[in-house]
Amino acid sequence: MNGLNALSGVGLLTVPYALSEGGWVSLALLAAVAAACWYTGILLCRCMDADDAIRTYPDIGERAFGRTGRLLVSAFTYVELYLVATGFLILEGDNLDKLFPGARVTLGTVSLAGKRLFVVLVALVVAPTTWLRSLGVLAYVSATGVFASVVIVLSVLWAAAVDGVGFSGRGTTTPLRIAGLPTALGLYIFCYGGHPMFPTLYASMKRKSQFPKMLVICFLLCTLNYGAMAVLGYLMYGDGVLSQVTLNLPSARLSSKVAIYTTLLNPVTKYALVVTPIAAAVEERIRGAAGKGARAVSVAVRTLLVLSTVAVALALPFFADLMALVGSMLNVAVCMLLPCACYVRIFGAPSMSSVEAVAIGGILVLGSLVAVTGTYYSLMKIIHELV
């Protein structure tokens, strides 16, 4: 369940858009990305077996490349988490604006309306949850993400089959869209960004030999769910599918409300869990200077962190493009490039079989291509939206 929860997230809403960008053949790339990310998850755990002192992903980086490796892994992970938290706010703003169009609040000379209003309101709701030192309750609640992902797919299916949306969306007859592949691949890789959690899961298992089998089951089930949502959303809306398929749904229908409200639940419950590692790292740096005011410093750091994600969400309210950027620039590094590099560094190329060498080489080539092209196209799209 923890493995499924690590892989089940808001990426589910973007896969129909990714399919519209890449064409039908890109579904094969979804499967290829899943296989590559599964294999790199196995590589991470083999790295952990090399040293009993390794407990976390940054530990693997340090074992492979020393202090520089730890800093590199930590930097990629924290920036990824920060932008995912920002994406949560954008998603909430988009969907709440669909449920309550025309909402506006005016305080003196300051007026907030639409998506911007809801981004700020959601931030006010989640800010107190980040102040909690123990996130046990939130961790339990966030585990509902597995169930929520299934509910969203079933609600979208109900909207199509029962509520009259149908499957008559007009899409392209081109099986593969080369120009849209970087965006599609970035979004697909974003769906499988659970690698920072895998070492913790592996370390907590009583029978570690079952980890590869567990990981296969998790990736298989999540890929089936992602694939079903991609096909379903694209058949419903074709090339008109939006960056989040819930934004296409008729808001008056019960199935649409169930899908949207379920979508809204996950970010609210997971926001604190996502930003806490970043806040903890900052607090660790300034703990010595805090003294008796450690609690106040903690609250201040976490509040400022929330405010900064609000600022970014308001400045860059482009959910699909931002998540494609996260997938291409950060998830590729965390989920594909760094696991391969650490494994080769720790065990050495001579110790690998020819099959391992080919698999790792293929993943490094694929990851590098996605990192370069995906990051470029995502940045160009964001810049185009801004100007």
Image (cartoon, rainbow, N blue to C red):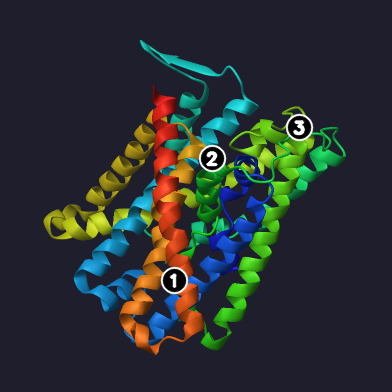
Residue 234 lies, with reference to residue 54, above or below; the image says above
Marked residue nearer the N-terminal end (2 or 1): 2
Residue 320 lies, with reference to residue 294, above or below; the image says above
Q: Which type of secondary structure does the marked residue at label 3 adopt?
A: loop
Rendered residue at 86%/41% (across/down)? 161
Residue on which the image places disc 2: 179
- Give the position of the C terminus as an image quadrant: top left
Rendered residue at 26%/68% (across/down)? 70
Q: Which type of secondary structure does the marked residue at label 2 adopt?
A: helix
Marked residue nearer the N-terminal end (3 or 2): 3
The three-letter code of the residue at mark 1 reads Gly
Numbered label attached to residue 361: 1
Marked residue nearer the N-terminal end (1 or 3): 3
Numbered label attached to residue 170: 3
349, 81: nearer the viewer: 349
213, 143: nearer the viewer: 213
Residue 272, visible in the rendered structure: no
Circles 2 and 1 in contact, beta carbons < 8 Å: no
138, 183: nearer the viewer: 183
Residue 338 lies, with reference to residue 247, above or below; the image says below
The three-letter code of the residue at mark 3 reads Arg
Rendered residue at 28%/77% (across/down)? 64
